[in-house]
Amino acid sequence: MLNENIKAIRKSKGLSQQELAVKLNVVRQTVSKWEQGLSVPDSDMLISISEVLETPVSTLLGETVIEAEVDNLKAISEKLEVINLQLAQRKTTRRKIILWLLISLCIIIVMIFAALAILNSPYLGWDYSDPETAVLGVAFHSFEWLFVRVAPIIFIIAVIGIFLTRKKE
């Protein structure tokens, strides 16, 4: 019984024979002999084994210890639960970031539209005989032309994205 209990408790603690031997200041073969029932530890060593394995001497000497598979499954399920919670938090954070980016994009588009409406295309009255002014005027006109055509599409897509990324209560 002692040999089976030492082996079962050692395994349930996740220790190898070598690790247990190092903690007890003995060679691995000694632990192997105890577990095979070829030898028995003396009383002082039995106390040391109980301290290292964090189990009472009476348990080591008592009935056969069954390896706790249920405990292992419980530990694994708890770890999986923690991982699932972390993934859910990461997903929620990612969703919030995307939501605020889309809202910011809509605000920026509206602000640029407002600025363009207030400015009322001032470059149209410029004198284009100066090459630098002509290049700057064409750049402004190109930006405005492209923005007026592309921004509404981007705005609509962003609004749809906002509705899709909102958390459904």
Image: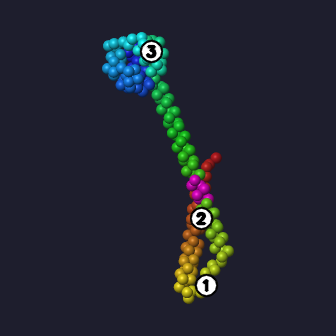
Residue depicted at x 44% and y 21%: 52
Residue ID for mark 2: 155
Q: At x 64% / y 66%, what residue is drawn?
A: 110
Q: How many marks?
A: 3
Seen in the picture, residue 93 relative to 140 is either above or below; the reply is above
User: Which residue is labeled 3 in the image?
Assistant: 47
> Which structural element holds mark 1?
loop
Q: Is residue 3 one of those drawn in magenta?
A: no
Q: Secondary structure at mark 2?
A: helix
| Helix, strand or loop for the magenta stretch, by majority | helix
Please tell me which residue is depicted at 57% across the width and 80% down the height of the picture. 137
Label 3's element? helix
Q: How many angstroms separate mark 2 from mark 3 (CA)?
A: 74 Å
Mark 2 touching mark 1, by CB under 8 A? no
Crowd class of label 1 (few under 14; some 14 to 19; many from 20; radius 10 Å): few
Q: Amino acid at mark 2?
A: Phe
Q: Position of residue 157 (x, y in %)?
A: 57, 62
Q: Earlier in the sequence, mark 2 or mark 1?
A: 1
Give the extent of the magenta segment: 97-103
Question: Could you tell me the amino acid type at mark 3?
Answer: Ile
Q: Are marks 1 and 3 in contact (CB under 8 Å)?
A: no
Percent across and percent down for residue 26 are: 36, 20
Q: Residue furthest bottom?
A: 129
Percent of width and height locating residue 35? 36, 17
Q: Quadrant of residue 67?
A: top left
What residue did someone put label 1 on?
A: 126
Q: Nearer the viewer, residue 120 or 167?
A: 120
Of labels 2 and 1, the one closer to you: 1
Left or right, 161 with respect to 55, comes to right
Is label 2 or label 3 in front?
3
Q: Does residue 27 sit above or below 63 in this rendering? A: below
- Disc 2: CA contacts within 10 A as few (<14), some (14-19) or many (>=20): some
